[in-house]
Image (tube, rainbow, N blue to C red):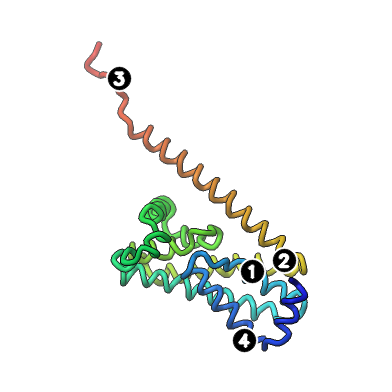
């Protein structure tokens, strides 16, 4: 597989490769099943064997991620729920329950959810879409989405360069990281709502008029 990739990218001009990486990063935000992080890791591998430059891969994937995130934001903001649920295929991907979950995150953590979006695999498209549905400030959304993609891509590309030809190992680690992170996040949310309900529950055992 590695030998095949080296031969393939030997025949493709670097500029075309950067465009492909950027477009793949864009699609990963617009079409959730596409594994965008794997594409970034592949770019890192090509940097490690001197086929591409670090900054070329970094900028193309980061700008692609930002463009994809903002595309979903504007879809949510200007087309709204009628567009999302017009087709069953879109409705299956962007379930109302996932939108509500994103709304809960925004209610608890505010715009910082956008900053964390790149670290939440599988929820990035929902977060960007929800940010548009809730009409969050476009400038703040773009800035935080850019910072999130910048930090995440820098970490992945740097790790991929150090690992070199073992780049699939990093992909496996990222998948496991995302699974563990989402489980921990779900646990935190459950604990938060349980404690909130307990605080809101009236103390039925106490009657100030009963001597």
Tag 1 residue: 154
Q: Quadrant of residue 197?
A: top left
Tag 4 residue: 16
**Classed neighbour count for the residue bearing mark 1: other residues with Cα under 10 Å, few (<14), some (14–19), many (≥20):** many
Q: Is residue 201 above or below residue 177?
A: above
Tag 3 residue: 206
Marked residue nearer the N-terminal end (2 or 3): 2
The Cα–Cα distance between marks 3 and 1, rounded to whole angstroms, is 57 Å
Marked residue nearer the N-terminal end (2 or 4): 4
Marked residue nearer the N-terminal end (4 or 1): 4
In the rendered view, does 32 fall on the left or right side of 53?
Answer: left
For the C terminus, the image quarter is top left
Give the image location of residue 200, x and y in percent.
33, 34
Query: Foreground residue, 200 or 164?
Result: 164
Indicate which label's residue lies in the foreground, 2 or 3.
2
The Cα–Cα distance between marks 2 and 3, rounded to whole angstroms, is 62 Å
In the rendered view, does 193 fall on the left or right side of 202?
Answer: right
Q: Is residue 118 above or below residue 197?
A: below
The Cα–Cα distance between marks 4 and 1, rounded to whole angstroms, is 21 Å
For the N terminus, the image quarter is bottom right
Indicate which label's residue lies in the foreground, 3 or 1.
1
Query: Foreground residue, 29 or 200?
Result: 29
Q: Quadrant of residue 138?
A: bottom left
Residue ID at (67%, 58%): 172
Marked residue nearer the N-terminal end (3 or 1): 1
**CB under 8 Å between discs 4 and 1:** no
Query: Foreground residue, 6 or 134?
Result: 6
Marked residue nearer the N-terminal end (4 or 3): 4
Q: Say which element carries label 4.
A: helix
The Cα–Cα distance between marks 2 and 4, rounded to whole angstroms, is 22 Å
Tag 2 residue: 167
């Amino acid at each position: 597989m590695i030998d095949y990739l080296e031969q393939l990218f030997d025949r493709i001009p670097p500029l075309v490769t950067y465009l492909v990486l950027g477009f793949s990063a864009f699609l990963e935000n617009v079409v959730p099943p596409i594994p965008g992080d794997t594409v970034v890791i592949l770019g890192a591998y090509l940097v490690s064997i001197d086929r591409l430059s670090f900054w070329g891969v970094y900028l193309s994937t980061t700008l692609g991620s930002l463009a994809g995130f903002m595309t979903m934001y504007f879809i949510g903001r200007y087309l709204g729920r009628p567009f999302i649920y017009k087709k069953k295929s879109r409705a299956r991907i962007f379930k109302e329950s996932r939108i509500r979950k994103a709304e809960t995150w925004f209610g608890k953590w505010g715009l910082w959810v956008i900053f964390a979006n790149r670290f939440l695999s599988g929820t990035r498209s929902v977060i960007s879409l929800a940010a548009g549905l809730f009409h969050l400030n476009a400038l703040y959304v773009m800035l935080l989405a850019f910072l999130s993609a910048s930090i995440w891509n820098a970490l992945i590309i740097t790790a991929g360069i150090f690992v070199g030809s073992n780049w699939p190992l990093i992909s496996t680690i990222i998948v496991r990281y995302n699974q563990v992170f989402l489980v921990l996040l779900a646990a935190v949310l459950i604990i938060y709502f349980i404690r909130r309900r307990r605080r809101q529950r009236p103390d039925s055992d106490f009657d100030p008029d009963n001597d």
